[in-house]
Amino acid sequence: MTLSEPDIVNRPSLATPKKTITMPVSAARPDGAQATVVVLGVERGGTSMVAGVVRALGIEMGPRAGLNHEDPLFLTEDHELLKKRIATRNTENATWGFKVPKATMHLEFFESVLRRPVYLVAYRNSLAVADSWMQRGAGQLTGVLQRVQTYQDALLKLYETSSAPILLINYERAVQDAASQAQFVDELIAFLGIGVDSEARDRAISMMTGDGGGYVNLPEHYFAVADARDTRPTTRLELVEANPDPRDAEGWIHHETRKPQLIYRMADGSNLPRRFRLRIDFTHGEGTDSADGSLRLFFRFTEHFINAHCVRPVLRDGLNVLDVETSGHADAMAFGPWETLPMRFKLSVEAATPIEGTAISDSQPQAGQKLPLMARIQNRLKSRIRSGP
């Protein structure tokens, strides 16, 4: 027996021929010459991907936004300080934005102070969020799921009460494949009502990886660090320390705040090379674990130091040798602890020319990341990096 199309009665009533990537709760205002784009969602829930795409489309998300596209000036929960920073950004840009997942828990405040807010909300599978937290030792299953539920309750209240434009984003569908990534970027451009050329569109698409793919830098802020696999002699490059000597009489650097502590630049004032080797002599002080990755490497782009975030070179006592690749736009680098805990260490740094054939490649994954991610990032960005000035 053959059934014709009208005779089929067991098709799910809610089935759709095309799976949506974005879903507007309320439409964007067509006359919006000014806007504040706010990226919301739970931590590890796709907010960095969304914010990276927004940045790549040309919307200012903070000059110090780093690898996770999060402006550190908006991490505070001091409302009076936030009001001042919001007022400053309003004078600097007609349209700007920020990504801070914890802002989800302060939406009533932001609703009252932001100029023409536009909310972009990332949704990712809750178990994937929990898995990401647990892989980083940052939480347990039930605790993370409770956090997801708390954030979603806060967002639901926003949907019910706000008149601002709101776009919900299905993270897994957005990053599924090249076609989905392009579709997401096009839908976001249309929702924001911004004009972009093909280069900006391609740049935005390049900020996306597969599900759980991790962080991707803007091409001009690109950097990667890997343990050197070849210890043959190299030619020394002239580095100078660019900040007042932070050492005490015995050579120790003392740390109590989260900031770069030891800054280096090229002696001739040029930018750091696109490829170079670092030889780091490191000694940790009593009470400091030298292998915990708490000492971070920072790069300075556009006059601001950007934290390498996931790039936490594990510096062990003695000589450490690292290969570094950058976009060529960094004019300085710095070392400093990430945690706001008392710490002391000794550190001396030399730079050298790289050994031929040892550039960070697809066979050398970035610290803390899997091989496929490094391959995807470099395939998308290196052509831009190497074609620059």
Image (spheres, rainbow, N blue to C red):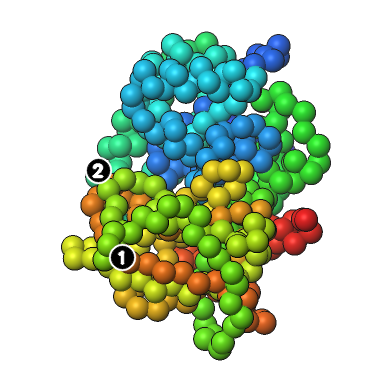
Query: Is the C terminus in the top left, top right, bottom left or bottom right quadrant?
Result: bottom right
Residue 381: give x, y in percent of width and height: 69, 57
Query: Number of labelled discs?
Result: 2
> Residue lying furthest front in this view?
249
Picture quadrant where residue 94 is located: top right
Who's the residue at 50% across and 55% down the image?
242
Who's the residue at 63% across and 23% down the image?
93
Q: Which label is found at residue 143? A: 2
Who's the residue at 43% across and 52% down the image?
244
Q: Amino acid at mark 1?
A: Gly
Q: Are marks 2 and 1 in contact (CB under 8 Å)?
A: no
- Whether residue 223 is visible: yes
Q: Disc 1 marks which residue?
A: 251
User: Height in image: 337 above or below 279?
Assistant: above
Work out whether residue 332 or residue 231 is closer to the camera in this orientation and state it. 332
Question: Is residue 94 toward the left or the right of residue 41 in the image?
Answer: right
Circle 1: is it few (<14), some (14-19), or many (20+) Cα within 10 Å? few
Secondary element type, mark 1: loop
- Whether residue 157 is visible: no
Secondary element type, mark 2: helix
Residue 346: give x, y in percent of width and height: 32, 66
Work out whether residue 295 or residue 180 is closer to the camera in this orientation and state it. 295
